[in-house]
Image (cartoon, helix red, strand yellow):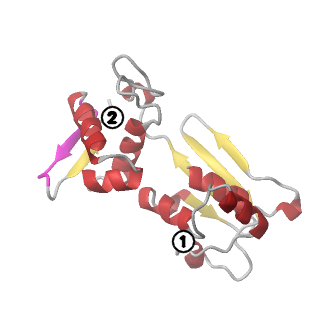
């Protein structure tokens, strides 16, 4: 989501005096950047992670602040976790919708809640693992650790906790199976 917020800010067309819009609903978050694709840019270009920032000076400021690493890396990070169908592109705007598909009551933990569990999960790693499992049910723990930038050991602890609480189940073998989220 961080990448989508930065993209919405950098790619908005401020000449129309319409800032990006960030909306939070009960079931999703929606980020809208006005101006659509740049002239000459196709949807294929957009999803190929080649950067064409509309606001080069703003991009430079974000780079100087360390908020972006390299041009084009934001969309590739988003597409590692989400399918490109979360993006709606028209002539006048680009809208990105991040669904909340896991009921909040399933995310509560002993001696904690969605904002922090007994192991100090203040970054919402449990929720991030669940969202990743929903988008990529066949992902390995090692791949999850890489995508989420947390240790494989922490991924294993989270998976164990989710299995014990019967929030997720493994379907098939460890090598060729997949994870299923149980919606109670």
Looking at the picture, tell me which residue is in the foreground, 134 or 69: 69
Cα separation between marks 1 and 2: 31 Å
Neighbour tally class for label 1: few under 14, some 14-19, many 20 plus, Cα within 10 Å: some
> Which tag, 1 or 2, sits closer to the chain's start?
1
Label 2 CA crowd tier, 10 Å (few <14, some 14–19, many 20+): few
Q: Position of residue 27 (x, y in %)?
A: 53, 38
Residue at x 80%, y 64% (from the top left corner): 13
The tally of labels here is 2
Magenta part of the chain: 166-174
Q: Position of residue 33 (x, y in %)?
A: 71, 58
Residue at figure coordinates x 38%, y 49% from the top left: 132
Quarter of the image containing the C terminus?
top left
Looking at the image, which residue sits at the far top?
Answer: 111
Q: Where 163 falls versus 36 (above or below)?
A: above
Q: Is residue 38 left or right of residue 97?
A: right
Using the rendered view, name the quadrant where residue 8 is placed. bottom right
The quadrant holding residue 45 is bottom right
* Residue furthest bottom in the image: 40
Residue carrying label 1: 47
| Residue of label 2 | 183
Query: Does the magenta segment cover residue 86?
Result: no
Label of residue 77 in the image: none
Q: Are marks 1 and 2 in contact (CB under 8 Å)?
A: no
Residue at (58% x, 68% y) in the render: 70
Q: Disc 2 on helix, strand or loop? A: loop
Q: Is residue 170 magenta?
A: yes
Residue positioned 54% across, 72% down in the render = 49
Q: Position of residue 21 (x, y in %)?
A: 73, 48
Residue 129 placement: quadrant: top left
């Amino acid at each position: 989501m961080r990448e989508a917020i930065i993209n919405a800010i950098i790619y908005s067309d401020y000449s129309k005096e319409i800032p990006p819009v960030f909306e939070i609903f009960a079931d999703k978050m929606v980020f809208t950047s006005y101006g659509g694709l740049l002239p000459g840019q196709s949807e294929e270009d957009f999803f190929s992670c080649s950067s064409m920032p509309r606001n080069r000076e703003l991009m430079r400021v974000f780079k100087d602040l360390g908020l972006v690493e390299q041009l084009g890396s934001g969309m590739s990070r988003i597409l590692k976790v989400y399918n490109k169908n979360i993006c709606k592109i028209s002539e006048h705007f680009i809208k990105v919708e991040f669904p909340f598909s896991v009921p909040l009551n399933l995310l509560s933990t002993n001696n904690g809640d969605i904002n922090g569990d007994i192991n100090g999960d203040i970054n919402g790693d449990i929720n991030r693992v669940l969202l990743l499992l929903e988008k990529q049910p066949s992902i390995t723990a090692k791949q999850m650790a890489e995508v989420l930038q947390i240790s494989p050991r922490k991924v294993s602890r989270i998976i164990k906790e989710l299995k014990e609480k019967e929030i997720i189940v493994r379907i098939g073998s460890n090598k060729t199976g997949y994870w299923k989220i149980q919606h109670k």
